[in-house]
Image: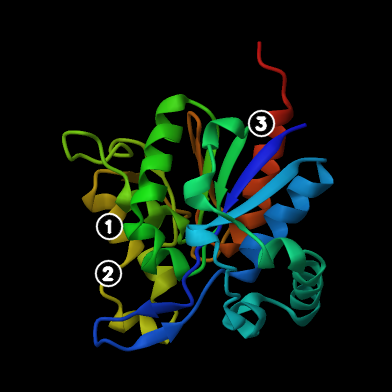
Amino acid sequence: MTRVLFVISAANGWTLADGTVHPTGYWAEEVAEPHRVFSEAGWRITIATPGGVAPTLDELSLGIAGGLPGTRKKIRAYLNSITDELNHPVSLDGVDESEFDLVFYPGGHGPMEDLAVDAVSGALLTRRLASGRPLALLCHAPAAILAATNPDGTNPFAGRRMTGLSNTEERLNSFARKAKWLLEDRLVEVGVRYDKARLPLRPHVVVDGNLYTGQNPQSATALATRLVEALSTPST
């Protein structure tokens, strides 16, 4: 059975440049849709967070920003169906990522707060990338690579082709003008070959070897489906 380590931010707020904290957490669709796709494929999912803290749902993700009412209703219902899993994650520092066939990070603004500076997550990502085994990050989750470092201080993801929420998409949020930094800018700064869709808010998946990334919440299903296809195809 295919095993997935599903790493979710434990943050419940995003500290802005003026010192205010914007309530946040994980984005509903980015957890619900990949979890559903992986579960329907028969995969075993282990949810992990920093410190084993139950992750917080960003309620904005089930408001107007989360899509049509029918879609939001289905997503909320799915999240409710996995409440026990979400409320009892394992601690990220207690897992061995080498035991999993896939390591998957969903987004939301949460990773901008905690995973971007989490040394445990950074070391895990460094090892996973070097292992050549599948690693996937969605929307804001690529912020987690900012905590990954090589012994010489460089970022192990430098030179890799990736996507993540674009500056244009981020600025659709009124509070983004107060952000300390934007994801696209930081990815470019550490040497990532950043790639995005021609139009904002459109599904966009980038694959570079064992590294899979999705640009935005609209990419959640496409990224998860691509991973199921890739891991279900026998190697030659």
Q: Quadrant of residue 26?
A: bottom right
Q: Inspect this view and state whether residue 116 appears.
A: yes
Q: Quadrant of residue 42?
A: top right
Q: Inspect this view and state whether residue 139 appears.
A: no
**Looking at the image, is 181 positioned above or below residue 233?**
below
How has the structure been colored for display?
A: rainbow
**Label 3, label 1: how far apart the Cα atoms are:** 29 Å
What residue appears at the point 81 percent right and 71 percent down from the top-left corner?
A: 74
What residue appears at the point 44 percent right and 70 percent down from the top-left corner?
A: 169
**Position in image of residue 138 (x %, y %):** 52, 54
- In the rendered structure, the answer to whether residue 225 lies left or right of residue 165 reads right
What residue appears at the point 70 percent right and 47 percent down from the top-left corner?
A: 45
**Looking at the image, is 6 positioned above or below residue 211?**
below
- In the rendered structure, the answer to whether residue 151 lies left or right of residue 197 reads left
Residue position marked by numbered label 1 in the rendering = 186
**Label 2, label 3: how far apart the Cα atoms are:** 33 Å
Task: Give SS at disc 1.
Answer: helix
As drawn, the residue found furthest toward the top would be 236
Residue position marked by numbered label 2 in the rendering = 181
What residue appears at the point 79 percent right and 78 percent down from the top-left corner?
A: 73
Q: Quadrant of residue 70?
A: bottom right
- Circles 1, 2 touching at the beta carbon (< 8 Å): yes
Crowdedness of circle 2 by 10 Å Cα count: few (<14), some, many (20+)? Answer: some
Task: Give SS at disc 3.
Answer: helix
Residue type, label 3: Ala
**Disc ID at residue 230:** 3
Crowdedness of circle 1 by 10 Å Cα count: few (<14), some, many (20+)? Answer: some
Task: Give SS at disc 2.
Answer: loop
